[in-house]
Amino acid sequence: MTRRRKTYKLPALPAHMVDVDSPGGCVLRFLTPVGELEQEIDLTGDGGRGQLRADIAFALRHHLADKSCIYREGIARSLPRWFEFLDIRDPSRSMITAARHVDEAVLRAYIASLDREPWAKGSKAASWSTVKVPFAWLIKHRPDLAAPGLDLPHNPFPYRNRDTPGRSILSGFEVDATLTACRCAIEASWNRFQTGRELIANSPIDVPLTSAGKLDLKDLGVLLRLISTRYEGVLPDRRSAPHDVVLSRIWDEIKQHHPGWREIAGYLHATPEVLAPYMIAIGLQTFANPEALRNFRRDCMTEHLFLNGRVLVTWEKGRAGRSQRRSFLRDRGMSVPKLIDRVLEMTAPLIPLSPVEQRDRLFLCAIASPRSVGLIAPWLPSRLVKQFVERHDIRDSSGRPSQLTIAMLRPTGLSLAHHKVGFDVLKTQIVANHADPATTKHYVDRPALRAAREAMLAGLQGRFVSAIRIGTLDRVDTQSDDTGHIDGRNATAAGFICADPLSGVAPGQREGRLCTAWLGCFTCPNAVIPLGVETLARLLKTRDALAAARMSMAPDRWRLVYAPKLEILERDILPRFPAAMRPEGEAAMEGAPMLPPIE
């Protein structure tokens, strides 16, 4: 009997994509590792060019499987631009109906149409990438679905980062003024929210919904309790329920006897105005992009595995293939973990009222007219930041109003971090979560930073030249000559007492400076060894440390550096102590000072 051979040939069209004109035929569903629905993207559009949409959906379903939700949303937002172009090129929708009908001429025509748009080069490249990604996947994995011999144009928008001017950044003076204003606003909003919770908890009555008209709504605690009980903490617009007598009375009382709805809402939950200073302070410290900052998740914090008191903050960036993260201390006043904890508490009442797909987001807010609860809108942070600057009268060093925008937070933070790490691009790349140092260089290559870096390099070069001219290159010391106050008496190391620790007789030391040659005392003429229990305990502890170091380092290094010292200690120094003193010295080892690491 002939054995049947298995075929690995794939069908030209997946069976589940045959009926593409029906609703849901091009819906991408992405699942979590445990099988729950994570995200759903509908590429059906107006239903035209169904086969082409199905081919693209098939490619994106595989390509986007391991990508972030934000990246997938960006792809879905950009694809309609491609189909609008096809409707202009093929109005009858009869020539380009599937992926195999898209040849190189069509792609180059699309590139030409993008080039005519008054956009930045980076925006054009992003729109082209949205189309390139699915066709590149088809060419590699399913060439039978793509046009025969299709060759994608290579890098039609080169040097998009080089030609894009860098964003303006805030000066150090503006950053300090901004953080001071944020601190004041954050403390005020947090105190108001805490007061609201106390008033609701201490309200002397259990608000009866049937007799709410008899309540004294001039009392802030009663008013907050009624809103929290009857309307779940978010007051609807009175126009949405014109026959609700209680609602109308609440609005009248707020207008006549209370400072206004925004103030009342601050006692109950987060509002857009409350979130603005939190977003500014968090953005300046995490260096997150504006859209990534807006989409922070509620579970973005995890305790650091190795460092106590530090917290890892993780978020997703649209174009990045991996999560962005930074670690912060929790015990500082304006630390990111502490700010996130406060936002979590102020937005917790809004979770049940938010859309299901937004309940995992951090920056939830509510407005009353019209009532809307959910993730803060994409356009809103920019307007709120402008209002925040005007409200707190933030100015630059020349006295002009600050030009702070939400997009300036990332380049400003990275520029300050670059200056703090000594203008090291590779170190700045780590905190920026960049895959390529060239991207980091584009952020930090600014005239002010360039001048500071050149001044630092000029200073180093000047000291180097001076050291060569005066012949002291082998002992250049960058420390200031401030050793006049040092008392060298009784300076000890590894159990020894030094007769003159400022003499500079040890190798690599300088006269007039405190000797730092630890373990060099074994062969130093200034070494003084008192015959005492404390000295013996320190020497025994040093001996054990030298012996233990043999197992933790390369044998050649231990034999070259530490073996001679151990031999001197065991054969020449320890035998000089009386045998009766040895038990006392061993007992005193636990109380002896900790030794520096031997490495």
Image (tube, rainbow, N blue to C red):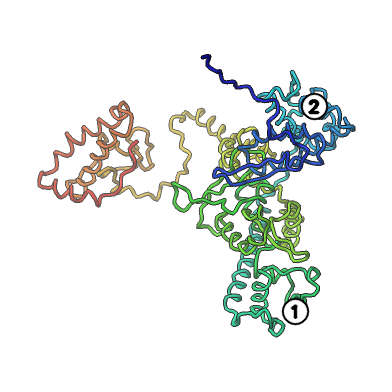
Res 107 label:
2
Q: Quadrant of the C terminus?
A: top left
Which quadrant of the structure image shows residue 434?
top right
Q: Residues within 10 Å of mark 1 (few under 14, many from 20)?
A: some
Q: In this view of the protein, can residue 473 be seen by the observer?
A: yes
Question: Mark 1 or mark 2, which is nearer the start of the sequence?
Answer: 2
Task: Name the spot of residue 66 as percent of width and height, x first.
Answer: 60, 37
Q: Which quadrant of the figure has residue 62?
A: top right
**Taking 515 as reference, is 522 left or right?**
left
Residue furthest top in the image: 2
Q: Nearer the viewer, mark 2 or mark 1?
A: 2
Residue type at the position of mark 2 = Leu
Q: Nearer the viewer, residue 381 or 575?
A: 381
How many tags in the picture? 2
Residue located at (68% from left, 40% from top): 28
Q: Is residue 419 visible?
A: no
**Location of mark 1 (residue):** 253
The residue that appears at 49% across and 30% down in the rendered structure is 470
Image side of residue 262 versus residue 176, left or right? right
Residue placed farthest to the front in the image?
1
**Residue count near mark 2 (Cα–Cα under 10 Å), binned few <14, some 14–19, many ≥20:** some
Above-or-below relation of 357 to 32: below
Q: Looking at this view, is 353 or 272 the one in front? A: 353
Picture coordinates of residue 29, whole percent (x, y): 66, 42
Amino acid type of the residue tagged 1 in the rendering: Glu
Disc 2 to disc 1, C-alpha distance: 63 Å
